[in-house]
Image (tube, rainbow, N blue to C red):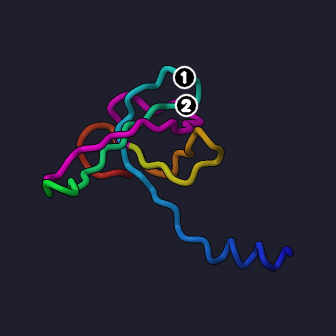
Amino acid sequence: MSEDTATIEETRNARKVREGIVTSTNMDKTIVVTVTDRVRHAKYNKFVLRSKKLYTHDEANDAGVGDRVRHGDPPDEQEQALAAGRDRGEGALT
């Protein structure tokens, strides 16, 4: 049994890392990040912006509203762990 789970973990695909903008920092150690995706409409072939709000873990409480952050694989069902990078204002993620 343990050999089966080891092979499953090794063959598991990399999880999607999303990038978004912090919209709320009112909770303790948790921020709300809005992720916006451009998707092509099936019928009209125009691009449509779709946004989703995600809860992200912020252990140090140092993220501010308007920061661009990346987050990845969720440690639990609701809150996603802040993977890497925070950008205050314009420019590339660090």
Magenta stretch holds residue 22: no
Relative to 76, 17 lies left or right? left
* Secondary structure at numbered mark 2: strand
The spot of residue 6 in percent (x, y) is 75, 75
Tell me: 47 left or right of 33.
left
Q: Is residue 19 left or right of residue 72?
A: left
- Residue name at image x 42 percent, y 36 percent: 53
**Is-magenta flag for residue 49?**
yes
Q: Amino acid at mark 1?
A: Met
The image shows residue 4, relative to residue 36, as above or below, that is below
Residue depicted at x 25% and y 48%: 91
Q: Are marks 1 and 2 in contact (CB under 8 Å)?
A: yes
Residue corresponding to mark 2: 30
Q: Which residue is mark 1?
A: 27
Mark 1 lies on a secondary structure that is: strand
Placement of the N terminus among the 4 image quadrants: bottom right
* Mark 2 closeness class: few <14, some 14–19, many ≥20 residues within 10 Å: many
Image coordinates for residue 20, horizontal then vertical, percent: 36, 43
Q: Residue at x 51, y 53 (%)?
A: 72
What's the CA distance linking mark 1 and mark 2?
5 Å
Kind of residue sitting beneath label 2: Thr
